[in-house]
């Protein structure tokens, strides 16, 4: 995934590729009294093998602030807006590919999932010599 601001994910279990577009990132204490960072995306699909298209829908990925602080310490990366956006985009891509929680507008990411996404973002790519 090149960018968390606008990307494609999938295919989903129905063979569709989804478009995702970043809308906003904010601390949720101001909007729903939660100690989390919420990242909102709009997602949609134009169809796939089945020809079924999905209209634009909102998905909000919530990441608990204490979990983010722990994860950034574990991977030695600062807690920044772009880092949160990338973590949320990774979770959204997983949701699309598995279709898990796609019926929900607001989804909270587990601490373990955050750690796995952060490790994937911070590890240097391996070099293969042939």
Image (spheres, rainbow, N blue to C red):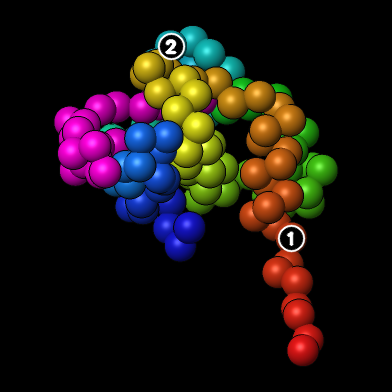
Q: CA distance from mark 1 to mark 2?
A: 34 Å
What kind of secondary structure does the magenta stretch mostly adopt?
A: strand
Q: What residue is at 82 percent from the left and 43 percent from the top?
A: 74
Instruction: List the single residue furthest toward the top.
Output: 33
Where residue 116 appears, as percent x and y from the top left, is 71, 41
Q: Is residue 114 magenta?
A: no
Q: Quadrant of residue 36?
A: top right
Where residue 8 appears, as percent x and y from the top left, is 36, 51
Instruction: List the single residue furthest toward the right.
Output: 74
Give 94 or 63, whichever is nearer the viewer. 94
In terms of secondary structure, where does tag 1 sit?
loop
In this rendering, does residue 84 appear at all? Answer: no
The mark lying in front, picked from 1 and 2, is 1
Q: What residue is at 71 percent from the left and 27 percent from the top?
A: 111
Q: What residue is at 52 percent from the left and 38 percent from the top?
A: 94
Q: Is residue 109 left or right of residue 69?
A: left
In terms of secondary structure, where does tag 2 sit?
helix
Where residue 100 appears, as percent x and y from the top left, is 49, 24
**Residue located beneath label 2 in the image:** 32
Sequence order check, earlier mark of 1 and 2:
2
Where residue 27 appears, as percent x and y from the top left, is 48, 27
**Residue located beneath label 1 in the image:** 123
- Start-end of magenta stretch: 43-62
Question: Is label 1 in contact with label 2 (beta carbons under 8 Å)?
Answer: no
In this rendering, does residue 31 appear at all? Answer: yes
């Amino acid at each position: 995934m090149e960018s968390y601001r606008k990307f494609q994910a999938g295919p989903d279990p129905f063979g569709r590729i989804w478009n995702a577009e970043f809308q906003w990132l904010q601390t949720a204490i101001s909007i729903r009294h939660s100690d989390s960072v919420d990242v909102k995306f709009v997602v949609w699909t134009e169809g796939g093998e089945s020809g079924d298209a999905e209209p634009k829908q909102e998905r909000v990925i919530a990441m608990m602030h204490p979990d983010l602080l722990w994860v950034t310490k574990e991977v030695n990366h600062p807690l920044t807006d772009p880092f949160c956006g990338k973590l949320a985009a990774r979770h959204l891509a997983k949701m699309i590919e598995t279709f898990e929680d796609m019926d929900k507008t607001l989804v909270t990411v587990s601490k373990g999932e955050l750690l796995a996404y952060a490790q994937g973002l911070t590890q240097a790519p391996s070099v293969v010599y042939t």
